[in-house]
Amino acid sequence: MAHVSDSDDIVAKLLTESFSRMSYTDKLELITKGRPTPQLNLVQKTKQFERHFNIGNYARYNWMTGSTREQKLYCWDCLLFGADSGSWARDGYSDLGSLSKSAHRHQNASGHLRATIRLKTFGDTRIELQLDEQQRRGVILHNEKVKRNRGILKRLINCVVYLGKQELPFRGHDESVTSSNKGNYIELLDLVAEYDSDLHTHLATSTVFTGTSSRIQNDLISAVASVMTDSMKEELRKAPFVAVMLDETTDISNVAQMSYVLRYVTDDGIKERFFKYEDVTEDKRAEAIATRLLEFLRESGCIDKVVAQCYDGAAVMASGLNGVQAKVKETIPQALFIHCYAHILNLVLSKGASKIRECKVFFSHLSGLATFFSRSAKRTKLLDDVCQHRLPRAAPTRWCFHSRLVCTVAEKTRELREVFEHIVDHHTEFDDETVHCSDGYITLLTSFDFSFWLKTFHAIFSYSDVVFEILQNKGFDMQFCLARVDQLQRQIEQEKGNFDSVYDETQALVGPPRGRGAQGDVRARYRELHCSVIDSLLTQISNRFSDHKKLEFLALLDPQQFGHYCNYFPTAALNSLMGSYGGYFDQPRLHTELAVMYGMSDILGKSPADIHQFLLKKGLSESMKQVYTLSCIILTIPVSTASVERSFSALTRIKSYSRSTTGQVQLSDLALISIEKEFLIALKAKDQLHDDAIKFFIQKDRRMDFVFR
């Protein structure tokens, strides 16, 4: 008997890939290994007792086998050679109450007997080839032809992979023989054919299947994407927990695209994988989006593993009453909602600054600076010559762009003044609007008010930019990110004590305040404004990050507290964990494992990611299973939807103005190839891509032979 693990479920593979479509060598190897006899968790409950599958049945019935994935029994002989589609051949058998009766009836059936004979005589079944030399030679010629055809198909797949990774269009406007530009796909094939005689011969002589039609291109793209999706689902199957991240944007064709990204932990670390785009234009209600999401999770086989969901703050997504997160929780109660922390920080800065009139005026002037140069090539050329640095455009909803603009202006203030003074001095070379605006900007850059706020926000943004970078990095766990937010709050609060230095430096640079605001105790007024801005930001941070109290259990693996926990166990954090994810843990056992871990010098100061890797490398993931599970949950919980946002960047590159007619399925497949290119490269390096892609490709009828006999 050949025992098989769940990770190598031969029966499950045979249910999807017919034995008859395998090569003779693969068939012979499979039969030589023998039928798998796995231990199944097959249970049947009755009113009086429970029936469990007895592995001794494999010895009793020498044809019986099982699938750990399907948790069903099958007939090995019929699975390989039977034409029957009954319960023992394709559907699987699971009724333990009638097992003996059904097994006895099946092994006496004529179909089973024929399958058994074919299995036992498989080594002799090719005797006809020995008797018929012509047929034997026919098989050899056929297999040689198939080998050549599959070689050509691999070259076509390589071209598809290259264009997909580089986000290049496939089709040309005119793909005729006389066209000077047949599109990237055909032109790339022609280029490769110049150095590849086999491909050159195929393209020059083939009349049945050249592989250049639009249908073949789309089928190859779909085949590559299908291989990637199946491989990612295999990763998901091994992952203990999953978090889902969603966001929606509108593409160039005014189609609402929903992006699906899943986060999970493998032995190699944290993964955030893009899976697909979906058109949600027709119905963007919370109920419809939640229904689509749940269906996607079921198709991916991970709905029972979801522990967190992360979206932006839109009411349709984040509402705890009727939003998507609430609808998902009705089906998956443990799916903790995380409001994207990068989005929250963006709101903190925008709302905190915009509430002060002087700040709003400052940022409007700042945006005007960037706009001034972007509207004229001549102005931009002058900026490049003098500053050697362009001003980033400020986006109303993206305050990290305001930060870049503030930092650039603060660092290039002297050069900007030179630019504007040059324009005024050479006024005859520029139009009236340019000269007028330049004169105004000289006044602005030398004003106390503008310079004071520039220094103030330059200091604040120098702290917030670091946190923005951290929140958008998938490698950091939630506990680390929350600690950085707390640190940002302390740093901003410390800026209150820096008022005098900011005020004095500004006064030394541009002189004292002038104009209508320079009456009375000017210093006191600016101190009050400075404190108002700081207090507004601190209030926004406190209010908008207040919900992280529900994540109190993260403190259980806070490396800075391990020494303290040796004497004072974090009971409140443990209770928080049991309230959110109690179903995954044995609380007394977890308490014991944590107490032991806090006293281990090998783990002292290690982050959750380091603890996760330490337990794996030392073979302690089973011995300390509760702590291992805790580390997996903490690493699975996402901090932001940055990966989803990045998928939208790919969307704008793939579906551009000139490629606005790209179909929805092809768009999603191309995005997968582009966004997950590193995963694709890894599949190709394992020599796993081509053969698997060909299996998907030949599922449709083809006019060439791609299957070995």
Image (cartoon, rainbow, N blue to C red):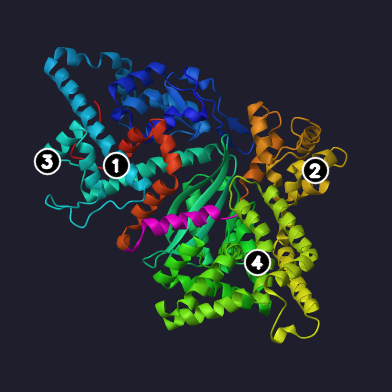
Query: Quarter-wise, where is residue 703 in the image?
Result: top left
CB atoms of marks 1 and 4 within 8 Å = no
CB atoms of marks 3 and 4 within 8 Å = no
Name above or below for residue 499 compared with residue 550: below
Query: Quarter-wise, where is residue 598 in the image?
Result: top right
Q: Which mark is residue 159?
A: 1
Category of crowding for the residue at label 4, using alpha-carbon neighbours closer than 10 angstroms: few (below 14), some (14–19), many (at least 20)? many
* Mark 3 and mark 4: Cα distance apart in space: 64 Å
Category of crowding for the residue at label 3, using alpha-carbon neighbours closer than 10 angstroms: few (below 14), some (14–19), many (at least 20)? few
- Left or right placement of residue 98 versus residue 593 in this view: left
Whichever of callouts 3 and 4 sits on the residue coming sooner in the sequence is 3
Q: Position of residue 350 (x, y in %)?
A: 63, 69
Q: Which residue is mark 2?
A: 561
Residue extent of the magenta highlight: 639-657
Q: Position of residue 422 (x, y in %)?
A: 49, 73
Of tags 3 and 4, the one toward the viewer is: 4
Can residue 639 be seen here?
no
Q: Position of residue 427 (x, y in %)?
A: 45, 79
Of 497 and 697, nearer the camera is: 497
Q: Which mark is residue 349?
A: 4
Q: Which mark is residue 207?
A: 3
* Mark 1 and mark 2: Cα distance apart in space: 53 Å
